[in-house]
Amino acid sequence: MTASTERRRRPAGRSTTTPALVGRDDAFSKVTGALAAGSALVVVEGEAGIGKTRLLREVLAALDGSPSPANRVLLATCPPVPEPAPLGAVVAGIRRLAPNPDTHGMSALGGALRPLFPEWSQDLPPAPEPLDDPSAVRHVLFRALSELVDRLGVTILVLEDVHWADTATLEWLLTLCADEPAGVRDLSIVVSFRPWDVPAGSLLPRLTARTPAGMSRLRIALQPLGIEQIRQLVASMYATDQVSEQFAEFLYGATDGIPLVVEEYLLLLEDRDDITREDGHWTRRLLTELEVPASVRESVLERVHRLDRDTQRLLEAASILMDPADEPLLATVADLDEPAARSGVARALASGLLRERSTGRFTFRHVLDAQAISGAMPVSERRRMHERAARALRRKDHPPVARLAHHFREAGDDDQWCGYAEASAELALESGDDRTAVETLLQVMNAAEHPIGRRVRLARQLGQAAFFGAAALGDLAEHVVDVLRRVLESGEIARSDRGELRLLLGRMLWAVGERSASFEQWEAAVPDLGHRPDLAIRAMANMVLPLIPDWPVSRHRHWLDRAGELLDQVATKDRRAFLDMRMTALLLLGEEAGWEALRHLPDSAPTRAGEREIGSTRVNAVWAMLAWGRFDGAREQLAVCRRHLEAADSSRLTYLALAVQARIDWYVGNWSGLDARVAELAGREDSDAESRLHARQVRGLLQLAAGGRSAARRELHEVAAEQTRLGVMEPEAVAVPAALARLHLADGDPAEALSITGPVVHLIAHKGVWLWITDIAPVHVDALLGMAAGNDADDFVATFAHEVADRNFPAPAAALVTCQGLVARAADDPRRAAGLFADAARLWAALPRPYDELLSRERQGRALLAAGESAGALELLADTQQRLHDLGARWDADRVAHVVREHGGEVARTWRGGRRGYGDRLSPRELDVVGLVVRGMTNRQAAETLFLSPRTVEGHVKSAMRKLGVTSRTALALAAVEAGLHRADGEDSVGAG
C-alpha cells in the first residue's frame, strides 16, 4: 500500500443511492402485471434477506409512477413477537394510511371496530350488541374491517412477514379471499413470508395454496443471486463498473447469494478496511475468514432458540462438522442417543436450517447458519465437540486427514494437529491443490516452535509447494518469505539444508519481486550446494539473467560458464532447466544464439510441472522478443504458450501471460479496453507482484497518452519507486522513467527530465545491454538538447549507433534513427531531420509500434514546417492528429491539433454525426475547462494546457456558467465543486476541440 493510497470509508466511498434491484426482473414484471390487472392474490416467498420487501417496494413505486396511478396501498408488516395482538399489524397499517379517516356513513357493523380503534370512538357507530358465539363476533369484526378498508379506497393490501401473523389476521385474509368477498371491491392482496418459519398448525398454507374466487393468483419464490448478479449489485452500491468476477465469486461463497447478506458483508469489509479505494479503483485485501454479520447471526440464533435443546445440540454438532454427516456421526459429536438424534434431525430439517445433501447425509442450508451457531457456542463445549469429531473420524477406514487436522487444532491438541496437517498438505500437493498446501503448512509453521529437524522439513515442503505449485499465491507469498527467513536465521541448520533453503528463499523473493535480494540468496547458496549439483546448477541458472541493476554482464556470464561446467553431472530435467534460462539470458543480452535455443524448446511435456516450465520459459522469451521489437514472433510464441498454460492449469503463469499480452497490446496499438484489463490485473490480490507491477506500468502509460497527466504522474512515480525498491532492471521497466521524463519535458523542465533519463542510460551503458535503450533514448536526446547539451547528444547518438551496428535489433534501430533526426533538427537541418523522422516512422510501423510511428510523423511534420514546406506538413500533421485520436492518444492528438491550427490548418472534428448536444449538462470539453478554472487558471493558462485558443476557452467558460446558472468565474468554481463536476485528482484530461 503506497503513501498516496486513497482510503475512503462510508459514506464517502459508497454510493448514497439505494443499490439496484438485481436479479429480479422476471419477478418484478410478473408482480407488477398481476397488480396492474386488478383483483389478484400475490404470494411472495423466500428466506430472510432474499429481497421480498425490496421487490414489493419497487413494484409499488412503479405502480405509483404509472401513467394512471389509481391505487391506494395499505401496507402492514407482522412483528416477530411471541404473542402478537389480534389484527395488530393491519390496525397499525390503517393508522399510518389514514390517521383521521372519515367514518361517517359506515354501517352499524363499524361499531365493532371500537376496540381496535378506541381513538375513533366518537366517529364510529355505537358498539353492537354482545354476541355469545365467538365465531359470530369474529365474523362481525371481519366484515367491519373489510368495510373500513373499502371506504378508505384501498386497492392493494400488502401484508409482509405473514409467517408471524396472528390467527385473526390470517382468518380475515381467508375471509377476503372467500367465495363471497366481504364487501371490498377490486382489492388485490399481496403477502410475503419465509417458508421455513411458518409454525405448525398455521392457517397460512390454506391462504397460499388456493386460488380465490374472482381473483387471479400468482406465487413467486425468490432465489439467491448468482455470481454475475452479485457483481452487478456491488457495482451499483459503489457506482463503478470495476468489480471483478473474482470478488463476486468471493462474496457468493461467503453469502450464498442472499442480497441482504451481500450488503452486510460489504459494510463489514469497509468497517475493517478490507476493501479500499486505490487510485480510483476499488480493491480488497486477501481475506481468509470473516465473522458473520450481526444481523445474520441474530436472525439465525433466534430460529435456533425456538427449538428444543436436543435439536440445538444436533445443530451445534453439524456446525462443528461442517461437511455432510450421517445420523450416527452427528449423534456421536452431539453426545445424543439414537432416538434423540433421529428426532433432532427431523426437527432440524423441518426448521429449514438443515438439509439432506445426499441420502442419509445432512448439512446446513447456508454456511452462514453454521458459522453463526458454532460462533455462539461456549468455547469449552466447542472444543469438546471438536475432540469427539476427531476421535470419531479417526476410526473410519479412510480417515480424512484434512478434517482431522482441523478438528484436532480446534480441540487444542497441537501434536495431533501438526501430524495430520503435514499429511493434509502432502495430500493437497499430490492432488494439485498447491494453495491449500501452502496455507496449511504456514499454519503449522506459525503455530508452535518445532524441533529443528521438523522445522527444516516443513520449510522445505513449504518453499517447494509455494514456488513450484500452479496457484497464484498473492499475499501468501510474502508470508512464505518470512517463514523461510526465520528458519534460516535460527543458526542451527546443517550446511546442506541451509543451501537448499537459500535456493528456495531466493525463488520466493523473485516471486514477490525482490530481484536483488533473490540474487544475493542464490549466490550465497552455491557454496553450500557442492554436494548437490542438481540444486547448484539451478541456483547458477537463475543468476545468468541480467535483471538486476548493479551486476555487470560479466558477472552474469561468470555464472553462465560455471553452470555449464555442471551439465554432465545433472539429470536431464535439470539440464533442461539451465538451457531454458540460458536461452532467456542470451535473448536479453541481445545474442543471436538465443533464437537458435528458442527453436529447440520442447513442444510438450508429459507432466503438468513440465508444461509449467515450458510455459514459463516461453513467457520469458516473449518479454525478451518485445525488447528486440519482434512483435509478430512474440504473438506467435504467446499463442503457443497459452496451450502450455492450459495443459499446466497454472493461474500464476496465466497472470504473467496476461501481463505480457497487455504490454504487447500497448506497443501494437490494441488499446480498446486495455485500461480495464490492466486495472483488473493490477487489482487482483491473488496475482503475483510481477504481474501487478507490469499491469500498473501499462496503466500509467495509457493514462499519460489519454491526457490524464496528473493520474499518470502519480501512477508512474509510484511504479518507479516500487521498481527501485524491488531492484527491478528489465527492458520493459525502462518505459516508466521515459514517460516521466516526457512529462517534465512537456512542463518545460528539461533538467528534471535529464535527471531521470541520465541514470537509466548510464546503467544500460554500464551493463552493456543496449538492446534495452529503445524507449528512453529519444527522450534522453530531447532532454540533452533542451539543456543545450548538443555535444553530449551527439556523443550519445554516436555511441548508440556504434553499439548496435551490425546487430539485427529492429526496435533499437527505429529509436536510433529517431535520435538522429532529433540531432539533425537541433543542428538547423530540418529537411534532413524530416527525412530521418520519415525513415523512423517507417521502421516503427514495420514492427509495428503505431504510437511511436505517429510521434515520429509528428516530428516529421514539425521539421517540414521549419523547412518551409507548410502544405505537405499540415496535411501530414492533420492525418497524424486524427490517427492519434483514433488510437486513444488524446494528449498527443491535442498537441498536434494545436500546431495545425496555429499554422492555419483545419483539424477534422472527432464527432461526425452532427453537433452533439448535451442539453443542460456540461460537455466533456466544458468539464475540462471547468476543472482548470477550479484550479485557479486563467483563460490563457487553460488554453495553453488544453492546446486551444483563449477565445475558445472563453466560450466554454461562458457556456458552463450559463448551464450552472452563475455569473462569475468564482461562482462557477464553487458550483462545480458543490456539484462534483471537477476532476478530484486535478487531472489534466485534454482532448481535441
Image: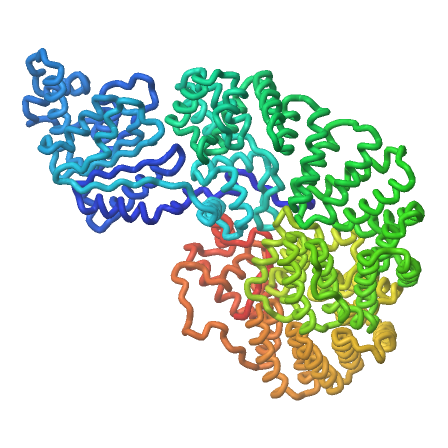
- For residue 716, above or below residue 353: below
Quadrant containing the N terminus is top right
- Residue 288 position (above or below residue 649): above
Residue 897: percent from the left, percent from the top? 58, 74
| Relative to 519, residue 662 above or below | below
Examine the image and state in which quarter residue 770 appears.
bottom right
Q: Residue furthest front?
A: 397
Q: Nearer the viewer, residue 21 or 411?
A: 411
How far across and how far down the image is residue 17, in percent?
42, 43
Left or right side of 111 for 498:
right
- Asked which quadrant contains residue 301, the reply is top left
Q: Position of residue 697 (x, y in %)?
A: 68, 58
Q: Is residue 743 visible in the rendered structure shown here?
A: no
The residue sitting at 51% across, 29% down in the picture is 325
Q: Classify 743 as above or below 873.
A: above
Q: Is residue 102 left or right of residue 55?
A: left
Q: Quadrant of residue 710?
A: bottom right
- Image-based side of 470 in relation to 670, left or right: right
